[in-house]
Image (tube, rainbow, N blue to C red):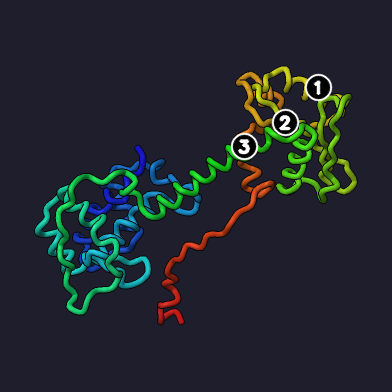
Amino acid sequence: MPVPTYDKFIEPILRHLAAHPSGTSAKEAHEAAAKVLGLSESDRQELLPSGRQLVYKNRAGWAHDRLKRAGLSSSPRRGFWKITPQGLEFARIHPSPLADRDVQVLAFEYMDVPLRPDSLGELPLPPPALPGMPSRDALASPDDRLEEALAELRRTLTAEVLDALASVSPSYFETIVLDLLHRMGYGTSRTDLQRVGGSGDGGIDGVISLDKLGLEKVYVQAKRWQQTVGRPEIQAFYGALAGQRANKGVFITTSVYTPQALDFARSVERIVLVDGKRLASLMIDHEVGVSARIIKVPKLDSDYFDEESV
């Protein structure tokens, strides 16, 4: 099952904290919520698109953020969560399960409340009832929305890269492929990647010397095609490798491969196939024909404010 949106984590986190009024570690709260929501081990291994954080822990963290802003919980120290007296009272007068309206109020109506209690330590006044159920986009955490936006930008850029590749000449496409392989770390220098191309190339478009003496080489074929690449083309490339007495080859295309082509490449083991989608992705990752801008996402450095660690 997909990991639920962060609003679904609010009640499990609240109930766990209410059951441990002296406080609990964030890790224990994460696991308790995951158990209540029935997340499998594979669900718990799901990562955000950035690959930097587990999805369920990210959403549990945002659920706790909403509880803090509503005055129901606190973080006395890093990685430690504790329910407030207001939180205990809220849990007492709102038996499980929480009404949809109560969850909506906690998820959305305190988003702009600063994360510090007012002078009286009172719970902010409850907001008016919401008119309807929020959309899934509204239920996404800020991290989710950021990741989704980045994923959308990447999908759009992938299509743009493939369109750009379709407009270059076959010879320049071969140069682009060698530039990419060099940026990926193949060859001791750019001069170690040579474009062959032309008639009589035997199906070889480029050669990569993996060592300074050129004793170990990888042969490359680059096809700027629209049609599907089939098994005959891969077999011909394999034959060209045999003619060069080569044991490593990379076949790169802007299109896709047939299942038969993929099966043949797997059966001979020494050929790697790269289709258009993967080619564009590699160009984006290694910034070949692509520029990137750095977006700074501010985050509190709690260690800085920990006087005991100074």
Evaluate whether residue 270 shows in this view. Answer: no
Residue sitting at 73 percent across and 29 percent down?
223
Taking the spot 58% from the left edge, 40% from the top edge, the residue there is 158
Of all residues, the one furthest to the front in this rendering is 167
- Quarter-of-image position of residue 278: top right
Image disc number at residue 251: 2
Q: Which structural element holds mark 3?
A: helix
Q: Mark 3 points at which residue?
A: 278
Residue 189 at x, y percent in the picture: 82, 50
Question: Could you say whether the residue bearing mark 2 is in a helix, strand or loop?
Answer: strand
Given residues 259 and 293, the one toward you in this image is 293
Q: Which amino acid does label 2 sit on?
A: Phe
| Tag 1–tag 2 contact (CB < 8 Å) | no
Work out whether mark 3 precedes mark 2 in sequence or the reverse, and give the earlier one.
2
Using the image, determine if residue 29 lies above or below residue 74: above
Q: Residues within 10 Å of mark 2 (few under 14, many from 20)?
A: many
Image quarter for residue 174?
Answer: top right
Residue on which disc 1 sits: 239
Q: Which of marks 1 and 2 is in front?
A: 2
Q: Nearer the viewer, residue 216 or 149?
A: 149
Residue type (three-letter) at the residue carrying disc 3: Arg
Name the amino acid, label 1. Answer: Gly
